[in-house]
């Protein structure tokens, strides 16, 4: 009897071990925002690519220390959100550091960084912002989930 119980317990442990999701990489290893990039040049390249592809530019402002920025960046690279963004936008990411880097670029597009990051601007064909998150709409991206993020980006900009 004990042998059957032990065998069942070991089988359950083995099956459960395979079903667990892998642990996420430590936050310190993630570097989704290039701290040395020339953000202005990156945006201009994105504008040229978008014009050639008939898409809009999505400028994402964030930082490597920001958990919500990490979640949004990861979400943008998978599933329905990736498909939606790939079909409509060329993405340019801008590192804002600790709100001390590329602040002039955020100001140029009317992006209020103090409302929280990540934050985005959608650029019109002429390079002006046609939409910005003005109230920290994505600042709690870690609680939004795929459906809410898809709904947020699946609108006319």
Image (spheres, rainbow, N blue to C red):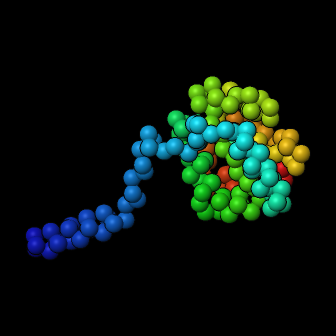
Quarter residue 22 falls in = bottom left
Which residue is farthest right?
126
**What percent of the width, then of the height, locates residue 51?**
83, 56
**What percent of the width, then of the height, locates residue 63?**
58, 36
Residue, x 79% and y 55% (percent of image)?
Answer: 50
Towards the viewer: 78 or 56: 56
Picture layout, residue 149 above or below residue 120: below
**What percent of the width, then of the height, locates residue 117?**
64, 35
Residue, x 62% and y 37% (percent of image)?
Answer: 95
Q: Is residue 133 left or right of residue 130?
A: left
Residue, x 61% and y 63% (percent of image)?
Answer: 79
Asked if residue 108 shows in the view, the reply is yes
The count of marks equals 0
Picture layout, residue 33 above or below residue 85: above
Q: Is residue 74 left or right of residue 50?
A: left
Residue, x 43% and y 50% (percent of image)?
Answer: 24
Q: Is residue 74 left or right of residue 17?
A: right
Towards the viewer: 31 or 151: 31
Picture layout, residue 53 above or below residue 35: below
């Amino acid at each position: 009897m004990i042998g059957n119980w032990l065998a069942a317990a070991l089988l359950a442990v083995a099956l459960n071990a395979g079903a667990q999701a892998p642990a996420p990489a430590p936050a310190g290893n993630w570097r989704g925002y290039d701290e040395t990039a020339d953000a202005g040049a990156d945006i201009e390249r994105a504008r040229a690519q978008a014009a050639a592809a008939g898409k809009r530019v999505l400028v994402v402002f964030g930082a490597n220390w920001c958990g919500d920025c990490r979640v949004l960046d990861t979400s943008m690279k998978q599933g329905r959100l990736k498909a939606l963004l790939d079909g409509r936008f060329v993405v340019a990411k801008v590192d804002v550091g600790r709100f001390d880097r590329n602040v002039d670029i955020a100001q140029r597009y009317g992006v209020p960084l103090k409302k929280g990051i990540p934050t985005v601007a959608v650029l019109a064909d002429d390079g002006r912002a046609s939409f910005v998150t003005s109230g920290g709409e994505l600042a709690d991206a870690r609680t939004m989930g795929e459906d809410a993020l898809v709904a947020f980006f699946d609108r006319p900009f």
